[in-house]
Amino acid sequence: MANLAHISLCIFAIFVSFSLQGNALSSCNGPCRTLNDCSGQLICINGKCNDDPDVGTHICRGGGSTPSPPTTPGDCKPVGSMTCNGKTKPTYRCSPPVKSSTPAILTLNNFSEGGDGGAPSECDEQYHDNNERVVALSTGWYAGGSRCGKMIRIRASNGRSTTAKVVDECDSMHGCDAEHAGQVPCDNNIVDGSAAVWKALGLKQDLGRVSVTWSMA
């Protein structure tokens, strides 16, 4: 009878142990089987919790077990850097979160053949005339091409607004080669607009960079 009670107690202890283990969330390099096993913004990769490469989190230091300070929602950390033409730029897989009025920097791009963009636009493999209201979005906002062909509304601080079609990516991860016309990677908050966009907003092109907001049209 005593042996039976002892065995029952052992089984109960094992069950409780597994239950507690199953409810625990793993931190950097901790064991995991599903996405729900990892704490915060970590993701389960090859059985261990690590930074999510698609989101661009940078919580684990060099893949070690010591986490860096937790990020707040919407944070977009650099994932590396690139140096060319004597200039070093951080590289990003992500962009700030898109809201009903998303802050951005408007830059000027020539989408025509032989222009600033180098290769044809990614969305349609076509060049675009400077009279077309078209834009390229930073890598995170471009979202793998999911916004290709869609219209966005851009608002300038002078009160004017215009719509433009997304035709290309302003690459925040790569640059300094022929495909990117030798340019450094884009910042992660860029709306790269054609001359027609600048004209519609009543902005002087020689300013080069202007603070704007944008949203889906």
Image (spheres, rainbow, N blue to C red):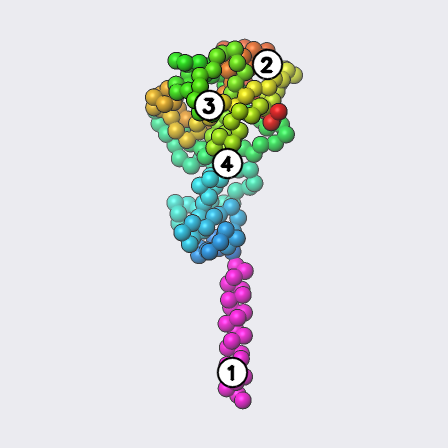
User: Magenta region: which residues?
Assistant: 1-24
Q: Which mark is residue 76?
A: 4
113 vs 208, nearest the viewer: 113
Q: Residue furthest right?
A: 159
- Magenta span has 70? no
Q: How many marks?
A: 4
Which is more N-terminal, label 1 or label 3? 1
Between circles 4 and 1, the one closer to the viewer is 1
- Disc 2 to disc 3, C-alpha distance: 25 Å
- Disc 4 to disc 1, C-alpha distance: 54 Å
Residue to which mark 2 is pinned? 201
- Disc 2 to disc 4, C-alpha distance: 28 Å
Which is more N-terminal, label 4 or label 3? 4
Check if mark 3's residue and mark 1's residue have beta carbons within 8 Å: no
Where the N terminus falls, by quadrant? bottom right
Residue at (58, 24) in percent of width and height: 152
